[in-house]
Image (tube, helix red, strand yellow):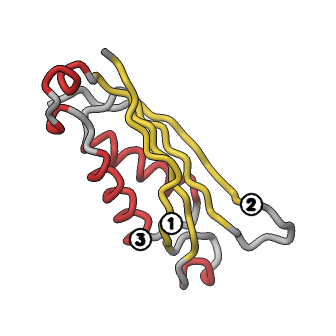
Amino acid sequence: MIGVVELERIRVEGCHGVGAEERSRPQAFEVSVRATLDLARAAATDDIGETLDYSRLGALVADIVQGESYHLLEALCWRIASATAERFPTQRVWVKVAKLNPPMPVRLGHAAVELEIEGHAPR
């Protein structure tokens, strides 16, 4: 039974951007993660150990955004996706990272990057 575990619009602050000013002070980001995985055992056993614990996934995302610094949203997005695939038994991982209120000469709601990668088989 293939299913999806999704966390949508995790709000966290981090220091990411091309300019030194962007990396010197925290800015608001929103991160969404969608992981495809086999949910059959979790559904049958009602055991959190048989699924992707979304509280652990949320903590992983927050740790990366708050504790690391990247110039590009692409690099931050890749780091979150690859860390998710490494730590959880996923088939596919999709991540979207949005920088809210980016420093730009035009007004916009956010700038974002999204990507999808292959996951890893359960260990």
Query: Going by the image, does 31 lie left or right of 63?
Result: right
Q: With respect to residue 41, does 89 lie above or below?
A: below
Query: Going by the image, does 106 lie left or right of 72?
Result: right
Residue situated furthest top in the rendering: 1
Query: Given the image, on which type of amino acid does mark 3 rest?
Result: Gln
Position of residue 46 measured from the top left corner of the image (x, y, whole percent)? 17, 30
| Residue 111: quadrant of the picture | bottom right
In the image, what residue occupies the spot 27% across and 24% down?
Answer: 39
Query: Given the image, on which type of amino acid does mark 2 rest?
Result: Gly
Please give the residue where the numbered disc 3 appears in the rendered image.
66
Marks 1 and 3 in Cβ contact (< 8 Å): no
Q: Nearer the viewer, residue 53 or 119?
A: 53
Please give the residue where the numbered disc 1 appears in the rendered image.
70
Position of residue 119 measured from the top left corner of the image (x, y, whole percent)? 34, 32
Q: Nearer the viewer, residue 78 or 60?
A: 60
Please give the residue where the numbered disc 2 appears in the rendered image.
109
In the image, what residue occupies the spot 48% across and 37% down?
Answer: 94
Quadrant, the C terminus = top left
